[in-house]
Amino acid sequence: MIAIKNPVSVPGSFLWEKAMRLLWLRNDLRLDDHAGWQALADYQGKTAAVYILPAHWQKTDAAGLHRLGAAKAAYLQQALADLSARLAPFPLTLLQGEPVELLLAWHQQQPFELVTHVAQAPEEAGWLARLCDAGVKVQTFEAQPLFEPEQVAPLLEKFPASFTGFRKKVEKFPAWSVPAPQAAADLGRLQAANCPLTTGFDWPAMPGAPVHPAWQGGETAAQGWLKHYLFERRALAHYKTSRNDLAGRYFSSHLSAALAWGCLSSRTVWHQILEYEQQWGSDEHSYWLRFELLWREYFHWSLRVHGSQLFATGGLTGKAGLGVFNPEYWQAWCEARTGWPMIDAGLKELMATGFCSNRLRQNLASCFIHELGLDWRLGARFFEQYLVDFDVASNWGNWAYIAGAGHDPRQGRRFNPHRQWRQYDPGLTHLHQWLPELGTVTLKQVEAHQRGERLLDYSAPLLPLEC
């Protein structure tokens, strides 16, 4: 049995034995390896499960950004539909609005004890605190990390300043072994409670769903892709050498969306890699995928430690003046017309599909921060709107890293864009896919145009890329 961790209790205004138990799902949209479902299965009374789409995710801010791009919304809709189907006949309640207000309204009409996974970011922590202050009994569990809080506790008071320091700690000692994922709870005896609330559920316009099989939302598709990638295609055999490619079906694991929305647990992926290694042996490629999972883990616990500090202009460093707002540059960025064909191609892919490769993300961030001089936090929010695999800790942690506001010992990474494309897209495969109007241009022509020589029938660059 999976235990509920980190209980948070406040004096209640009713008899708890009369309350029902409510599971509030956020980015833990699965049945396997899920302590929340086990908590419902263990309960002797009425139970319910709810997903609340925060209304503010679709509200546009002063910079013209919101949090729910079309591809991201499509993935979430698929994930919820898949979870509903896997749960049937037990109902999954879908609500839209301000989460705390909805939960308090429900609690007033039908008292419950709330079960949900721990807060990953200050916004979520604020939600849980408000619920507790209002008299809701809240119990939390872990749904996203590899390690238990007890394992990480020795590092939290003096958290490693670099990923290397963290990695060496966790790879050196047996106590840091990743717990095995737990089997799905037996939900056959759940007693469903009716939700006393009704809200509309207004999805944004979604012109098309992603075609890559790894980017279909839901636990069913995620489990199928993981099996296919590891054991049928054995694409992990070239992971380290192909992971920096810009395009392709198998160049990377494409597991990030499933991990971000909790359609797969990181522990499930970790132990499936170990099973792969038992069958075909461990090598640099299988190690490197676990290495990337450790990066994700590092950013996760860093956000737990540093909280709102990460979202300040200086990030974890406290520096001031890391970027400004230039409306001309910002508008051009949002319309993918920077005049740098290689950057515009990446932006077009991101906005159309909700995805671009890790290498492209690094180059986009570097140009945004170090060439255009824009505030790195605006770039992080731009990614948050579009990325299907948006993960608050990884996204903000990586943007801060590139900006010199995070955990990078070098205090920032500035990539040479010409050198990057010579190495990772010398045949212009990615460029031709997303900017077909350029025709049969050469890499030298593109580089010359980006330096300001205007050799192409394409918009002039905002600034010449001299590097």
Image (cartoon, grey):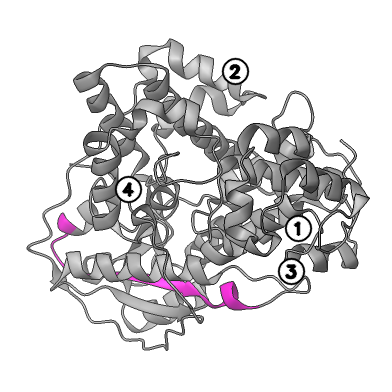
At a point 35% along the width and 13% down the height, the residue shown is 174
C-alpha span from label 1 to label 4: 29 Å
> In this picture, which residue range is highlighted in magenta?
41-59
Three-letter residue code for mark 4: Leu
Q: Which residue is mark 2?
A: 165
Rendered position, 95 above or below 334: below
Q: Nearer the viewer, residue 295 or 11?
A: 295
Instruction: Select label 4 or label 3 by which is in front.
Output: 3
Three-letter residue code for mark 1: Leu
Label 4, residues with CA under 10 Å away: few <14, some 14-19, many ≥20: many
Helix or strand or loop: what does disc 1 sit on? helix
Q: Which residue is mark 1?
A: 378
Q: Which residue is mark 3?
A: 335
Q: Nearer the viewer, residue 433 or 215?
A: 433
Three-letter residue code for mark 3: Glu
Tell me the quarter of the image containing the N terminus: top left
Determine whether label 1 and label 4 are within 8 Å by CB: no
Three-letter residue code for mark 2: Gly
**Residue 322 visible in the picture:** no
Tell me the quarter of the image containing the C terminus: top right
Q: Earlier in the sequence, mark 4 or mark 3?
A: 4
C-alpha span from label 2 to label 4: 27 Å
In this picture, residue 429 sits left or right of residue 197: right
In this picture, residue 148 sits left or right of residue 90: right
C-alpha span from label 2 to label 3: 40 Å
